[in-house]
């Protein structure tokens, strides 16, 4: 079996299974083998109930102390049964599993595995799995892969498909030269792929992950290193020397730019008037005021006879930018237009016609801007917002709409400078390191689940004062292998817990784009009081009236992502709050989360995260995806990133050509980052 064959060639996958795998973006054997586990289920030993503590996953052998009871709360059916062993007892709870009423019998012993939670000061075992003695014996001490799933596809089905693929596929050959593997202590690729799915133990799993992370960074670094080597000063046709619009805009703003904003704007002005093409990255923490600096650059482009475009990652953010740009610039005679995928065909046709004729000065949009049928009359400046959501290829596509236009990219991701130079080495880097005046620092608290009742009261208080609240959960729906708060059940529970007058909405990434936009727009307009969401709101929504965020199972996120999430509040003049609720309140987890309690500075958080976390901490923690890496995490794997960058620097362009000729699939993977080195 070849890597590029359709997954239907794998034993056990028929048409129905194929469609389910396709929903996960898996079409070929290679894509299945690169569909890495998101975490591992590690089965421990049976413990006494006395060892139970909040947030802990525990396996106990118990028998019922009383018959199970069913409690109904709306559509929710809760089964409760007190279980005991020789040293104590604990309440066991199952949700929406009424069949447990007939499963549990007095006088019978059961092996239960689940997470211990604190409910109203009492410990409970929540939604445990019931195991037979044989099942337990087969699983104890093993690391079982846990995959991202879609409805109708089980974890076992994915694991079985991977097993069958590994048995049948040719995995011979390793594109990394033996001396590189030896120098950086990397296992062979074939072993890494097998061990990332089915490791014999934690050591093998870590070694496999290290090799695959190195590969991701190495191929990215090959592309970047060639861009840097080829980086040279390009002469620009667009020399900007008129700045009257800048003065008019600064005079009408109800605030003064911070020193950090002015410093960066002066760097941009120097670039624009230099006679050379600008390629600059603005790094600025959430809420630091990057957008107004980009507006200054865009109106300067217009004043000097050209067009500008800004590309953002979500339609809601594009719409919000369009509204604020229009309001700010309408009395200056600057025409702004919106271009997104969900606009009607007629709206898109008109927008494209106005862009091509030059009727439009500034275009605000999503990926729709880089479609082939969008033609600019005279594009002289391109801006990409939330740069970590766009790859180098998308930057190239937008720049390709003009004749070597100036380029400005912006990122709110607090990447330490040493890593930013590797990731964005083809760009000059500016940093806005001061928040605008008048912004009150967010008040943070890191708590266990026993604080939840107080948090709900505080939520209701914020709503009664006319404010809005976010609740972030790590999952869309309950998973058989992962105990964490999930969006759909949580929304239902919150509606039953809080007063009926409080309007609560649910949002997650599996919804259709139109539905997501409608929910986010309703929240932005004040039509929803509490939005229960996955991390889909990490970028793309600006609601100054939102003053509180509570993040459930905060331990399941990386610190950098938690910092990005809390940046959704604190955007207005009112005091804002962020509650980081840990489902597992162990000492190490609370120590890590306390960094967020100590500081609102994203760069400080990122640096502390690098110091505190090592490569042994990857189980169950994932930062937000930077540059579409599957496994690699630029914070956690900073040392591997530096090694891969060092290794890539040893390869000349001819070496890369030779590798790609020998291993044809490499070229495709490198071109995912940039096509420049093959042009």
Image (cartoon, helix red, strand yellow):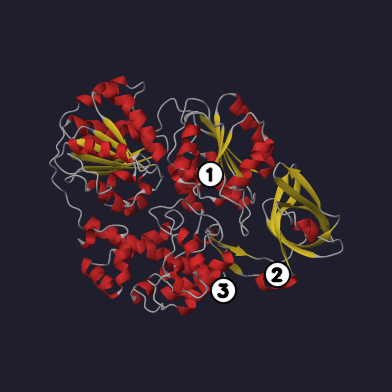
Earlier in the chain: of badge 2 and badge 1, it is 2
Residue identified by numbered label 3: 200
**Does residue 394 appear to the left or right of 232 in the view shown?**
right
Residue 506: image location, x then y, percent: 56, 41
Residue 374 quadrant = top left
Q: Earlier in the sequence, mark 2 or mark 3?
A: 2
Q: Is residue 391 visible?
A: yes
How far across and how far down the image is residue 12, in percent? 52, 73
Instruction: Tell which circle, 1 or 3, labels the residue nearer the N-terminal end.
Output: 3
Q: CA distance from mark 2 to mark 3?
A: 17 Å
Count of all numbered marks drawn on residues in the image: 3
Nearest to viewer (mark 2 / mark 1): 2
Location of the C terminus by quadrant is bottom left
Closer to the eye: label 1 or 3: 3
Residue position marked by numbered label 1 in the rendering: 595
**Identity of the residue drawn at 76% across and 57% down:** 100
- Of the two numbered discs 2 and 3 in the rendering, the one whose residue sits closer to the viewer: 2
Q: Residues within 10 Å of mark 2 (few under 14, many from 20)?
A: some
State left or right for residue 229 relative to residue 212.
left
In the picture of the structure, the residue carrying the numbered disc 2 is 136
């Amino acid at each position: 079996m070849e890597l590029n064959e359709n997954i239907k060639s794998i034993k056990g996958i028929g048409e129905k299974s194929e469609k389910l795998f396709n929903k996960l973006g898996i079409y070929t054997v290679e894509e299945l083998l690169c569909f890495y586990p998101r975490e591992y289920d590690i089965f421990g030993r049976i413990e006494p109930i006395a060892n139970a503590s909040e947030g802990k996953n525990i396996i106990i052998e118990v028998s019922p102390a009383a018959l199970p009871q069913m409690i109904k709360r709306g559509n929710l059916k809760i089964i409760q049964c007190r279980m005991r062993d020789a040293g104590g007892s604990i309440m066991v709870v199952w949700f929406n599993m009424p069949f447990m009423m007939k499963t549990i019998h007095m006088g019978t012993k059961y092996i239960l595995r689940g997470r211990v939670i604190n409910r109203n000061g009492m410990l409970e075992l929540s939604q445990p799995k019931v195991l037979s003695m044989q099942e337990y014996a087969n699983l104890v001490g093993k690391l079982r892969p846990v995959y991202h799933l879609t409805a109708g596809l089980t974890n076992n089905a994915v694991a079985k498909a991977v097993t069958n693929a590994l048995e049948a596929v040719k995995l011979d050959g390793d594109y990394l030269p033996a001396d590189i593997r030896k120098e950086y202590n990397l296992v062979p690729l074939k072993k890494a792929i097998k061990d990332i799915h089915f490791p014999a133990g934690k050591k093998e799993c870590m070694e496999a992950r290290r090799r695959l992370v190195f590969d991701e960074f190495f191929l990215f670094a090959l592309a970047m290193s060639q861009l840097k080597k080829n980086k040279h000063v390009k002469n620009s046709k667009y020399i900007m020397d008129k700045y009257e619009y800048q003065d008019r805009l600064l005079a009408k703003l109800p605030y003064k730019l911070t020193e950090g904003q002015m410093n960066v704007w002066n760097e941009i002005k120097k670039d624009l008037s230099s006679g050379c093409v600008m390629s600059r990255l603005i790094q600025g923490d959430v809420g630091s005021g990057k957008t107004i600096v980009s507006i200054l650059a865009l109106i300067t482009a217009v004043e000097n006879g050209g067009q500008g475009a800004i590309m953002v990652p979500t339609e809601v953010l594009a719409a919000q930018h369009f509204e604020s740009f229009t309001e700010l610039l309408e009395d200056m005679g600057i025409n702004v237009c919106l271009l997104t995928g969900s606009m009607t065909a007629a709206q898109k046709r008109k927008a494209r016609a106005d862009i091509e004729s030059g009727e439009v000065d500034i275009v605000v949009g999503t990926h729709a801007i880089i479609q082939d049928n969008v033609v600019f009359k005279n594009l002289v400046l391109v801006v990409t917002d939330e740069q970590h959501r766009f790859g180098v290829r998308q930057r190239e596509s937008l720049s390709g709409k003009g004749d070597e236009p100036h380029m400005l990219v912006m990122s709110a991701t607090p990447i330490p400078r040493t890593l930013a130079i590797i990731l964005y080495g083809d760009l000059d880097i500016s940093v806005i390191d001061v928040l605008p005046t008048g912004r009150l620092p967010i008040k943070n608290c890191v708590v266990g689940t026993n604080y939840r009742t107080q948090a709900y009261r505080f939520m209701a208080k914020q709503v009664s004062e006319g404010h809005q609240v976010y609740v972030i959960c790590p999952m869309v729906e309950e998973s058989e292998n992962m105990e964490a708060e999930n969006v759909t059940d949580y929304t239902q529970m919150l509606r039953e817990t809080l007063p009926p007058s409080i309007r609560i909405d649910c949002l997650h990434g599996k919804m259709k784009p139109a539905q997501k936009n409608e929910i986010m727009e309703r929240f932005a307009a004040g039509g929803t009081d509490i939005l229960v969401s996955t991390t889909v709101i990490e970028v793309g929504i600006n609601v100054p009236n939102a003053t509180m965020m509570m993040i459930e199972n905060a331990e399941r996120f990386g610190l950098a992502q938690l910092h990005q999430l809390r940046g959704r509040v604190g955007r207005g003049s009112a005091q804002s709050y962020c509650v980081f609720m840990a489902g597992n309140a162990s000492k190490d987890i609370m120590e890590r989360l306390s960094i967020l309690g100590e500081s609102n500075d994203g760069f400080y958080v990122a640096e502390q995260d690098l110091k505190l976390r090592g490569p042994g901490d990857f189980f169950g923690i994932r930062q937000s995806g930077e540059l579409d890496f599957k496994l690699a995490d630029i914070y956690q794997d900073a040392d591997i990133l530096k090694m891969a960058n060092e290794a890539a620097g040893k390869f000349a362009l001819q070496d890369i050509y030779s590798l790609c000729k020998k291993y044809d699939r490499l070229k495709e993977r490198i071109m995912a980052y940039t096509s420049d080195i093959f042009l």
